[in-house]
Amino acid sequence: MEGQFNQIIQDKILASVEADMPVLTRRDATLPPLKGKATAVIGMRRAGKTSFLHQCRADLIATGRTPPRLLYFNFEDERLSDMQAGQLHLIPETHLRLFPEPADEPITLFLDEIQVVSGWETVIRRLLDTPGYELFLSGSSAKLLSREIATSMRGRAWEIPIHPFSFREFLRHHQKEIPENPDALTTRKRTALDHHFANYLETGGFPEAQDLSAPNRRQLLQGYIDVLLLRDVIERHGVANVTALRWLVRRLLSSPAGLFSVTKFSADLKSQGISVGREHLYEFLSHLEDAFLLQTIPVATDSEKRRQVNPRKAYPADTALIPVFDRSGKPNTGHALETAVFIELQRRRSEVAYVKTPNGFEVDFLARSLDGSEDLIQVCASVDDPDTLSREVRALQDAAVQHPRAHQWLLTLESRLPFPEVPAPIQILPAWKWMLMAWK
């Protein structure tokens, strides 16, 4: 069995070492500060995980590391379809035979799509325990998920989520100026950033979708969703009621930032003649979140019962996914803006919920950062209407009674100056400026 893989593995190793480094848009994700752990790159399909592996390899080469000691190996190869965990040892052994020097430099393996090899976890743990090896792992969300890494690697992996481009990465990709100080910009530069941000909300952040027309972009993203549903949900979890699953996806992606109740949705399906138990809908929702197609957030409360009985708010992985199922033809700028803010909070690894106050006001986000600080964030595309502005301000003020330590933000679409006055400590500013501000 091993003989059939020897030549394939050798050819792939030589091709990898000899290949030119691809020219890619730099991502802002950072590497873990700890040694002795595998770096696990996770995220939705086509968000840029493989590109990030190449970026990490290039960064190590720039520090003086020897390229042959930095091996990128992609398992998504039909010639390796029958490979088992018992043959994985051939990769480091073949690599050492081909490139034995320098022995005092560690070997870093970038193992892409390793989840296709059954039983890979035990081999990776053994390599981690072998002196002189560093490991980067990446794979589709089908099998290399956050919770699975935590279980399989038993605390030996450091996760790096990769999302579609942030606004800063979007500007970098399109070779637009990224302001060093967003607080000090001319009117012309603010207007340009307003324009770029509007394009960002429409185009989204998937790298392959950047230069496509709207119809072609929609077709590309529809393909992403179809592959994700087939491989990461239907095949992986053995989903039989595909019709109900697709209705669920259509509902959630066409109503971004909306409140969602499994009980109500189950009743809606029943009225359409589609029978599915609520427990299965909860499972479908969990599978979609595991595959990073969307995320839901609960109401902010210390009561587990209240958290369970209240609807959740759902957000797609990227703003460009919204038009895929929304056939209304109406602009969805407000929901796209709120979605972009939520995804940015995910990048900052904040714990996010929405706020429903005792007086009936709602605030879009209560975000708790890793350092323990809190932010109340209200998103509003336009504050030109005085009644709208008054409503948003009242909501923040009412939520601040329950969360007095939280910073209060009112984020808008554009940087029209002067902004209307708002009572302290509320800060009003364009969402793109908030996104470009430095964060811990």
Image: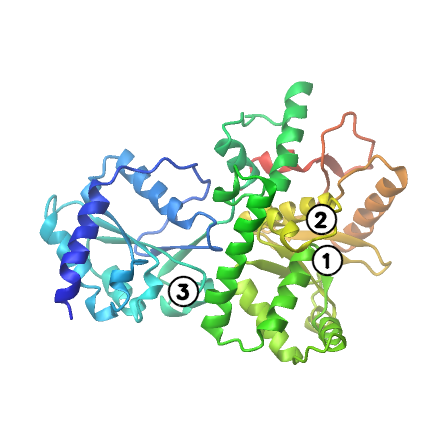
Q: Earlier in the sequence, mark 3 or mark 2?
A: 3
Q: Mark 1 points at which residue?
A: 258
Label 2 close to label 1 by CB (< 8 Å): yes
How far across and down, in percent of the image, does residue 212 sit? 54, 39
Which-is-in-front pick, marks 3 and 2?
2
How far across and down, in percent of the image, does residue 120 sit? 30, 67
**Mark 1 nearby-residue class (10 Å; few <14, some 14–19, many ≥20):** some
Gap between marks 1 and 3 measured at Cα: 31 Å
Q: Which residue is drawn at 48% across and 34% down?
A: 173
Q: Earlier in the sequence, mark 1 or mark 3?
A: 3
Q: Which of marks 2 and 1 is nearer the N terminus?
A: 1
| 219 over 80 or under it: above or below | above
Residue 204 visible in the displayed image: yes
Gap between marks 3 and 2 measured at Cα: 33 Å
In what element is the residue under mark 2? helix
Residue 299 appears left or right of 421 = left
Q: Name the residue under label 3.
A: 149
Amino acid type indicated by mark 1? Gly
In what element is the residue under mark 3? helix
How far across and down, in percent of the image, does residue 200 sit? 60, 38
Residue 30 appears left or right of 389 = left
Q: Which residue is drawn at 31% across and 52% down?
A: 35
Q: Which residue is drawn at 55% across and 58% down?
A: 293
Q: Given the current orientation, which residue lies at the most extreme right position?
A: 387
How far across and down, in percent of the image, does residue 141 sit? 45, 61
Q: In which quarter of the image is residue 280?
A: bottom right
